[in-house]
Structures are given as C-alpha cells and as structure tokens.
Image (tube, coloured by chain):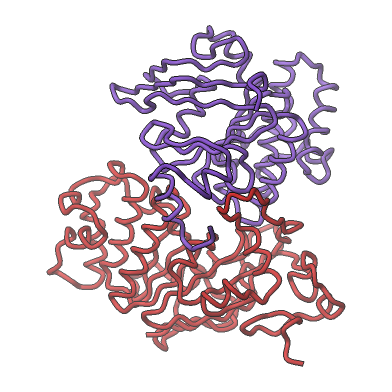
Chain colours: A red, B purple
Amino acid sequence: MTLEIKDLVVEHRSPGRPVVRAVAGASLTVRPGEVVGLVGESGCGKSTLARAVCGLNPVTEGSITFEGVPVTPLGLRRRTLTGVQMVFQDPYASLNPRRRVGDQIADGLRTARDGETDPADLLERVGLPREFAGRHPHEFSGGQRQRIAIARALAARPRMLIGDEPISALDASAQAQVATLMRDLAVDSGAGLLFISHDLSVVRLIADRIAVMYLGRIVEIGDTAEVWDNPRHPYTQALLRAIPKPDGMGVLPEELPGDVPDPAAPPEGCRFHPRCPFAMDVCRVKEPEPGPVACWLHEPA
Amino acid sequence: MSTDKTTLDITGLKVTIGGREILRGVDLSLQEGRVHGLAGESGSGKTMTGLAVLGLLPHGARATGRIALGERDLLTLPPRELNKVRGGEVAMVFQDPATSLHPMLSVGRQLTEHMRHHLRLDKREARARAVELLGKVRIPGAEEAYGRFPHQFSGGMRQRIAIAIALACSPRVLIADEPTTALDVTVQAGVLRLLRGLCDELGLAVLLVTHDLGVMSAIADEVSVMKDGLVVETGPRGKVLREPSHAYTRSLLDSLPGETA
C-alpha cells in the first residue's frame, strides 16, 4: 500500500510558451499510516506533484506507482485506481453546488462499491450532524464544506489520501482543526496521507515526515521534529526563519531575498544558489544529488 | 503615549446587521506612527471594525457610536464628505491582492486614478508620483511596472502594489485587513518589513487586522484582542502576548501549534 514517486518529471506545455518543468525530478515515498507533509513556496510544483499522483497531470518522465501498479492518467472511462483520493484546495469549487451533499458523498461510496453505508455516517465521522446530508453546499461555511469534501474522499475507502492545500482557503481558526481531522481519519483507516501546504506550522502539527520542495525538486526530507529543530538545507532554514514567532518581542522575521525563479528557465547548477547565503563555486555549476538534503554543504565528501 | 498623537479614535462602536449585534461597543485608538494589531477568531468582528471606519459596511448594517478622525465623526459624515476621506485620508489594504486589484486595468491606471481625483494632480504629476511609490514599495523596474497588469506580478509583488495604491494619497490612517494571509511566509516577511518601515517613515497610523499572533508579535506596537464583538484586552504588544490578563487571550496563545512562546 505504498505510494512511490521516483524521479518524477512533469512538464506543462502550452502553445506559444516555453515548456515549464513544474516538477523536475522529485522522489518521495508515502507508506500506509504515515503522514507526509510537502511544503514549499507557491509555484514550486507541489500541487502539480499532487495532481500527477492522482493521474490528473500526465507524467513526462519518471514513475509513480501505488501498491506496485503504475498510476495512469485519468481518462474519460471509469477509473480503476480508486485507492488514491484527493481533497482539493477550494471547497467552494470542488463541491457541486446543485447537488445535496449526501448525494455527493454517496458518489464516493458507489466508487468503493459500498451499498450499505449511509452518507450520514460519514458526515458524523467528520464531525457534522447527520441531518446535514439533505442540504446543499451553499448552506455551509468554508470549514464545514472542507469537512464534507473530506467525507466524500473518505467514502471511497482510499488507501492513500492526498490533500492539496486543503486548509489554505479556510479561516485561521478552522485550519488546525481540519488538518488534524484529516490526519486522524487517514491514520485511523490505515491510509497514508500526503498533505500539501505552504503553512509550515500546520504541517508540523500533523506530519510524521516533512519534505521541502523548491522549484520542482525536493531539497530536504526528514522526520518532522528533526527538520524543524535542525534544518540542514539553507532553503529550509530560510523558510523556518521567516515564520514570525508570537513571543511579543517585536522581532521582524527575516526576509529571503529575491523571488522564486521562473520554472521555465531555472538557474544553472543548484536551483537555490541565486538566493542562497552560502552559495559556493560548485553550486553555480553542478546540481547537488537528491538525498535527504540536496545541498553541497551536506554532501558526503 | 500623549493623547495629541491620536489619529483615529473609535468609541463605543456598535454595528447591527439584520437585528444581530455584530459589534457590541468597540473602543480603539490609533496613534500616529504606531501599528495597532487587532486579533481574534473569525467572526469576532475584526474585519467589521475595519470596514466601519471606511463606511464600507454591508447593506442594511447600522452603526452607532463614534469614529473620530480629528474633529470629524466618520459615522455621521455625509456621503460626499466620506468619499473624500476614503482612499484619501483613510486607506485600506485587503487580504487577497489577486482579487483586490482590477485585473483589466494597468497598475499605473489603478495607482493614479484616485490620486488625480483626491489630489487633483495632472497626468504627468500623477505618473511621476506613481513611479516613485512603486519604488518605495520596492517593485523592481518601477518605470516598466507602471504599464503592466496585475497578472504579470507575483502575489507578494501584487500586495506591494496594493499597498502603494493605498499610500498614494498620503493617508493618515491605513487599515490592513489580513494583508499577509494569502502570501507565503518568505514573502510575508518582506511585506511586514515594508509595512513597518512605511509606518515609521510616514508616521502612518496602522490598524492591522490579523489572526496570526506571530505576525502581530512581529510588527504591532499595541495589541487588542476581540471576542464576540467586544475588545476583551488591549495593551502593549509585550504585555498582551507574554502576560495576557484575559482568559481568552491566554487560550488563543495556548491554541497555537508549537511551544514557541
């Protein structure tokens, strides 16, 4: 029941524009019952990676296998791969506004060929009253809608749950709640969870492992506590330093100079070197090997 | 703080929408050159307080109390007068720069429109000032940026442009409603530094509405905490965040992920 992503490359092609390598060789494994948090700035390719895992974006190079079977792009036909389910960013767009939420959850149940379960049970599992099944999405708040989207994904009995920024459209007070709910439900059912977010503090709260992505590559991966307390890649260090601390000291967070470069024309050598405070000569020429930390500072000599 | 530096004074502000009391008597005062942070859960009335200052409350809302900008009470000001204040003396920065900027008007157009109206500048002066402002919020290549459209900028750059637009008519009060919530942490750091710098340099009185106590701790001088339409605690940043006296503030701090405090 493992999800394995190996040297994944995903390219976006659009007429009249240069080819954009949104994911440029990323490897990641998510085991059952494990929560992996994928973080990075916007535009680093984390959503593209998530969509590729669900077969929503075609794979250019590399491979994605789930339980040993390659993930094929989603087509018009009914799909066979129902073990991977996704919760999307914006519950205002991912739920059908014209159908009752109970019916939408029933879609998920049908996918799992489950004729017994009542959609209301799933609503209960995500902490909503049973009678909400007869209502339409517009009657709910953002946090409630995202709970419904989670219920719908869970109805299909996923063995791997993907959350593509599932909390960033929600109010701050609902974010931590929905994130922990996703974690609990995934772990309880023995499924793996790939949780994508740009909010490090929430990822830290729920993830067993953190993967940090920069411009299409995973630059650091490790146990949550380790990455948080002892970040090794300069980019991870910069990300963590940029989080303002509520200590009442009035310390302005440190700024990471520059913007994320255009993924259509990534810099030579290490992708982070134009913004890296420790850039050495080798960083400008040669890209570091992917590993727990993709950085020349930590390269075994 | 001496009282003569008070730029905006809100006293006993109550807002009712459809019979429901959203704000139940809010008192806040903004000082020149200081950032006043307003924290609280969603639905506690933070945003409504900001909107009430600008007279942007939703239809059917009734506001009572007093919002004093100098000698004037913004709540009783006739619409024509209020229009002069809005965008002129009091400006606002919204949460999401992707939706607060007009996608089909060039940045330059959005920067100069209200300047020409409020400050009665001619085209050339307005353009010169706009380019200067873009430089001030540190948009690289201000001259070229003037003719570009919002979609050609990244999120952080867009929020900088939104701030430039807000600052165009040299306001005395800036209301920033969750200005960094839609941004990445690395970009947020830059925008926060910019806001703080502008506040110190221009002597702006800033009302910063945010749910993020980390952001609050980084740039606010005074912090007020709201709950159910009331300000439950107000005080200097260090005191409210380190030794909160109200149980609700404490529970907000405790609910933060991590033990960073």
* Left or right placement of residue B128 versus residue A174 in this view: right
- The extreme bottom residue here reads A301
Q: Position of residue A242 (x, y in %)?
A: 65, 58
* Left or right placement of residue B176 versus residue B194 in this view: left
Give the residue displayed 70% in from the left and 31% down from the top: B33
Give the residue displayed 46% in from the left and 83% down from the top: A65
Toward which corner of the image does residue A154 lie, by quadrant? bottom left
Let me know if residue B28 appears in the view: yes
Give the residue displayed 29% in from the left and 46% down from the top: A137
Toward which corner of the image does residue A147 lie, by quadrant? bottom left
Q: Position of residue A64 (x, y in %)?
A: 49, 81
- The extreme right residue here reads A281
Let me know if residue A73 appears in the view: no
Viewer-proximal residue, A34 or A158? Answer: A34
B89 to A242, vertically: above or below: above
B115 to A254, vertically: above or below: above
Task: Identify the image quadrant of the N terminus of chain B.
Answer: top right
* Left or right placement of residue B255 versus residue B135 in this view: left
Viewer-proximal residue, B186 or A75? Answer: B186
Q: Position of residue A164 (x, y in %)?
A: 46, 63
Viewer-proximal residue, A125 or B26? Answer: B26
- The extreme left residue here reads A116
